[in-house]
Amino acid sequence: MMRRYLMLQKKYAVRAIGRSSSSIARMVCLALAGWLCGITPHALLAQQRLGDFLSIARQQSPLLKDYNNQLIAAQLDSLLIRAAHRPQVSANGMLMYAPVIHGYGYDQAITNGGQYMAVASVSQPIFTRKILAPQYEQLQLQQQLIRNQHSISTYDLDKSVSLQYLNAYADWLLLTHNQEILTLLNQQQALVQRLVQQGVYQYADYLNVTVALQNQQITVDQLQSQYDHDLALLRYLCGIHDTSMVQLEEPDITLHALQPQPSVFLQTYTIDSLLIANQKQIVATHYLPTVNWFADAGWNSSQLSTIYKTVGTSFGISLSIPIYDGHQRKLQNEKLQIQEETRAQYASFFRNQYAQQLSDLYQQLRETTQRIFSIQQKLATTEELIEIDKKLLQTGNVRITDYILAVQQHLQVQNSLDQARIQRWQILVQLNYWLH
């Protein structure tokens, strides 16, 4: 029997080691996959902190990747402009025969009987500095606008994820405190049952505790479902495919300092103004003289018999000066001026909204902080009352209904405190968003 027992122990030990090795291998593979995707193993295995969700959301966001690609495309546009003003080389060839049969055919004075051509040509615009400068400036402004929009989209994403994290964390706090009350009622139910058997309390008192316990269990189940839903929505926003149950950590959200440079939201209007001014410069370049040099070399003949004598070259300079276009320049400038006036109106309206928004959020922050301090004092009183009632309950010197009422009041005050803390964090998220 002893030998069989030792063999079984050895068998189970081998299985345990095998399962452990397999589990370790899976964890290593998972961590390696996360590293290859640019995600830290901690963030991949369990997202419990706000920073984890923010980091993954930024990595997964297709909008942010789109802005990065737009920046790369803008750099290529700069190279395209430069390439368009370099020498352009082309090769042209043509074989054309126009026969005259019995006096019928194209006029020989026009067709020369045919044309045989093989020519390589090159051309390039020159003196283009004044023309190119506004185009390069436009590309730089467009890149600034893309970077600015990238920053705003990043802050939008951070705000959305942070607010949803706070929603899920609020559910977690509510669930945790209700589970604590459920545990407390379970303990008190056993105590009341024993006191009923001793004749200290009546059976109706036991039923009151039981009903309160059952109602609390229903509340906990509902809160668990709500937490699961909000956690799933948080992962949905971040692009995380995961259904595991995690305990969210308390967020570390502090108020950012006001930046010395203008807000990114105001910079948008500044860049738009610069783009409109730049567009006026580009319109002006359309009315500058343009100069091109050109050259070609090859064969160009009307007779095949003498084609060997018609090898040659030509070169020269062309000049184009705009004179009249029906006042299009004036109309385009008037159109751009209307755009500038519209932009200025939007910018002025937004500045007023921006200042009002910050003022309102600072006021809410002060009021919420004061409310948290007041609720904390009330919470200490309810905790003291519960401790006294718990001692009185053991001796039968407190009514069950009074004890249940004290527990419910404590839970209400605790929920009020949690809501105030969540609201304060939400205000900080909003403030940090506008302070960028």
Image (cartoon, helix red, strand yellow):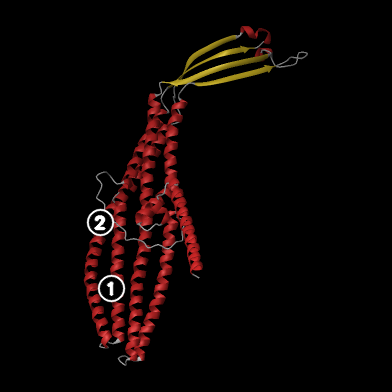
Q: Amino acid at mark 2?
A: Ser
Residue 299 lies left or right of residue 382; in this view the side is right
Residue 228 visible in image: yes
The one of 13 and 315 positioned closer to us in this rendering: 13
Read off the residue under disc 1: 413
The one of 362 and 29 positioned closer to us in this rendering: 29
- Number of marks in picture: 2
Question: Which label is found at residue 339?
Answer: none
Of all residues, the one furthest to the right in this rendering is 102
Compared to residue 217, the image places residue 151 above or below, namely above
**What x and y, as percent, mark residue 141?**
37, 37
Residue 254 lies left or right of residue 295; in this view the side is left
**What x and y, as percent, mark residue 217?**
40, 76
Q: CA gap, disc 1 to disc 2?
A: 29 Å
Q: Nearer the viewer, mark 1 or mark 2?
A: 1
The image quadrant that residue 200 belongs to is: bottom left
Earlier sequence position, callout 1 versus callout 2: 2
Q: Residue at x 31, y 63 (%)?
A: 422
Dots 1, 2 in contact, CB < 8 A: no
SS type, badge 2: helix
Of all residues, the one furthest to the bottom in this rendering is 199
Q: Amino acid at mark 1?
A: Val
The image quadrant that residue 423 belongs to is: bottom left
Compared to residue 48, the image places residue 396 above or below, namely below
Q: Residue at x 25, y 60 (%)?
A: 365
Compared to residue 25, the image places residue 292 above or below, namely above
**What x and y, as percent, mark residue 354?**
29, 52
Question: Which label is found at residue 359?
Answer: 2
Residue 338 visible in image: no
SS type, badge 1: helix
Local crowd size for mark 1, using a 10 Å CA cut-off: few (<14), some (14–19), many (≥20)? some
Q: Residue at x 37, y 32 (%)?
A: 137
